[in-house]
């Protein structure tokens, strides 16, 4: 089991990061705290050489790296995927898979690219968005098998839009997530906060069905308070129960604290980061030793 933390490119010069970490050297501090890897958000604006430098910096400090592309509202979203050599969505994700393969080689361990399904407006046919998601993840899995077998791909449980919002996100419901995973042969990222909000807003099931549990290969762990992606100090999301359920079903992969520096600051500062990592590590160890 690997414990990770969200970490943006340019973290060492970021003003909010500097407020949170103070004079500490960020990467050695995280490694000493017990963080094993970082998950880095990427997008169309991300420059390959800058990302490569970020990966090298993290790996040299003893931290593995995974990538998390964001593309909602752009032509790079899976809603616009087509299996043609000039398709913008395909080209961008080929770049990310290639960079992930370089990271895997550098860290001498497999890595992962966690991706959202298609997103569109309320006017889009949901079946079309679902079909595009399946086509994209089928292609992504096949491309990595052939070109980067050390890179895994996951499809994430999305947060459903607010009622009345003119937006759709494929994969905000467990049945859709299972269909994408089963048909494209990718694993799933279970986002605990998204699961909570989808249940709170719409009374959808809180935990995945048994058929989906066995396909979970990545986790985003965070609490909620007034918003999403909060430190594990509010005891709103039953994250301990979720982790116990996962481990009982054989999960032994990466758990990412998907919490931005501003949320740690707002919740009390560096002590909330320390408390979150320590609580997560202690609970995973307890669950594993108690099996």
Image (tube, rainbow, N blue to C red):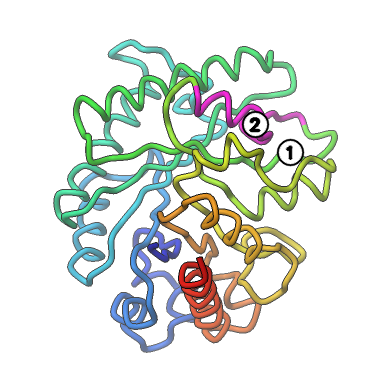
Q: Is residue 121 left or right of residue 258?
A: right
Q: Which circle's residue, 2 or 1, is located before the other in the chain?
A: 1
Is 30 colored magenta in this rendering?
no
| Residue to which mark 1 is pinned | 161
Residues shaded magenta: 166-182
Instruction: Return the mark for residue 276.
Output: none
Q: Residues within 10 Å of mark 2 (few under 14, many from 20)?
A: many
Relative depth, front residue between 285 and 181: 285
**Residue at figure coordinates x 23%, y 41% from the top left:** 150
Q: Extreme front residue here?
A: 291
Instruction: Return the mark for residue 169.
Output: 2
Relative depth, front residue between 192 and 84: 192
In the figure, 132 relative to 102: above or below?
A: above
Q: Quadrant of the N terminus?
A: bottom left
Q: Is residue 238 left or right of residue 26?
A: right
Q: Position of residue 240 (x, y in %)?
A: 63, 66
Relative depth, front residue between 41 and 138: 138
**Residue at figure coordinates x 59%, y 34% from the top left:** 211
Q: Residues within 10 Å of mark 1 (few under 14, many from 20)?
A: some
**Residue at figure coordinates x 26%, y 44% from the top left:** 100
Q: Position of residue 115 (x, y in %)?
A: 46, 38
**Residue at figure coordinates x 18%, y 57% from the top left:** 107
Q: How many marks?
A: 2
Q: Are marks 2 and 1 in contact (CB under 8 Å)?
A: yes
Q: Extreme bottom residue here?
A: 23
């Amino acid at each position: 089991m690997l414990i990770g933390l969200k970490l943006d490119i340019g973290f060492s010069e970021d003003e909010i990061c500097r407020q949170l970490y103070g004079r500490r050297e960020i990467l050695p501090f995280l490694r000493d705290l017990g963080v094993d890897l970082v998950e880095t958000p990427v997008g169309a604006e991300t420059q390959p050489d800058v990302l490569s430098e970020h990966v090298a910096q993290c790996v040299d400090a003893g931290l593995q790296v995974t990538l998390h592309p964001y593309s909602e509202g752009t032509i790079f979203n899976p809603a616009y995927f087509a299996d043609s050599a000039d398709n913008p969505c395909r080209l961008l994700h080929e770049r990310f898979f290639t960079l992930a393969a370089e990271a895997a080689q550098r860290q001498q361990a497999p890595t992962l690219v966690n991706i959202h399904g298609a997103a569109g407006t309320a006017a889009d046919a949901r079946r079309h968005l679902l079909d595009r998601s399946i086509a994209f993840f089928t292609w992504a899995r096949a491309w990595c098998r052939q070109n980067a077998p050390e890179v895994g791909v996951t499809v994430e449980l999305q947060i459903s839009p607010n009622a009345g919002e003119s937006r759709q996100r494929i994969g905000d419901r467990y049945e859709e997530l299972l269909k994408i995973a089963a048909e494209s042969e990718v694993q799933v990222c279970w986002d605990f906060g998204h699961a909570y909000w989808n249940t709170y807003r719409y009374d959808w099931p809180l935990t995945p069905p048994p058929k989906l549990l066995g396909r979970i290969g990545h986790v985003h762990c965070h609490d909620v308070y007034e918003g999403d992606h909060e430190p594990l100090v509010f005891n709103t999301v039953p994250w301990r129960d979720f982790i116990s359920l996962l481990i009982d079903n054989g999960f032994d992969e990466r758990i990412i604290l998907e919490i931005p520096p501003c949320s740690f600051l707002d919740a009390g500062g560096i002590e909330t980061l320390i408390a979150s990592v320590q609580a997560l590590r202690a609970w995973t160890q307890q669950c594993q030793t108690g099996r």
